[in-house]
Amino acid sequence: MMVGRTTTGYIREAFDDYMRRAGRYMPVETSVIPDVKASRKTTPEQQKIAEGQEILSRLKPDDRVILLDERGKQPTSRELASSIENGANAGLRNMVFIIGGPYGFSPDVYTRANSLLSLSRMTFPHELIRLFFAEQLYRAMTIQRGEPYHHD
């Protein structure tokens, strides 16, 4: 799940390609939360709350929610693959990875989250994080299958 559309064509194409690839290994679904229409009077906190309400409305009680957040754990690609595999083996029906809006997540979304995942301590545009995460998801699938895509 992600807040806002991916508008840059080549990033959207690459994202879609990696999601298609990952989808060959397990069901994957992308859900886009529309951008909150902010005005000059809308504060970042109000925007986070509005986005958070929409995020929470789409979650099911048994979803495992992982927020992509700069304060999260920074696993290796193999550790991410193992985490996804362990979740599947434990019978988790849905692992929901969420990429927030430009100001991050509301307190309620943090409360609902099961864990935080960071792809880097650096700051990147949200569109690039989407692409990086899609590639890592595909990479995790190939690691689980012992395919030669990932090199240590």
Image: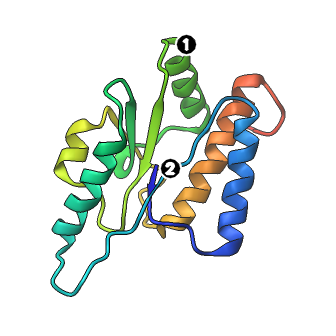
Disc 2, SS: loop
Residue sitting nearer the eye, 42 or 83: 42
**Image x and y of residue 126, in percent:** 48, 65
Residue in view at x 37 percent, y 57 percent: 100
- Dot 2 or dot 1: first in sequence order is 2
Q: Residue furthest bottom?
A: 40
Residue in view at x 21 percent, y 87 percent: 40
Which residue type carries mark 1? Answer: Asn
Check residue 42 in the rendering and tell me which mark sits there, or answer none: none
Disc 1, SS: helix
* Mark 2 neighbour density, 10 Å: few (under 14) some (14–19) many (20 or more): some
Check whether the beta carbons of the residues at disc 2 and disc 1 lie within 8 A of each other.
no
To which residue does mark 1 refer? 89
User: Which image quarter holds the C terminus?
Assistant: top right
Residue sitting nearer the eye, 28 or 70: 28
**Image x and y of residue 144, in percent:** 69, 24
To which residue does mark 2 refer? 31
Image-based side of 2 in relation to 145, left or right: left
Residue in view at x 18 percent, y 78 percent: 42
> Mark 2 or mark 1: which is in front?
2
Which residue type carries mark 2? Answer: Ser
Q: Quadrant of residue 34?
A: bottom left
Task: Name above or below for residue 130 compared with residue 136.
Answer: below
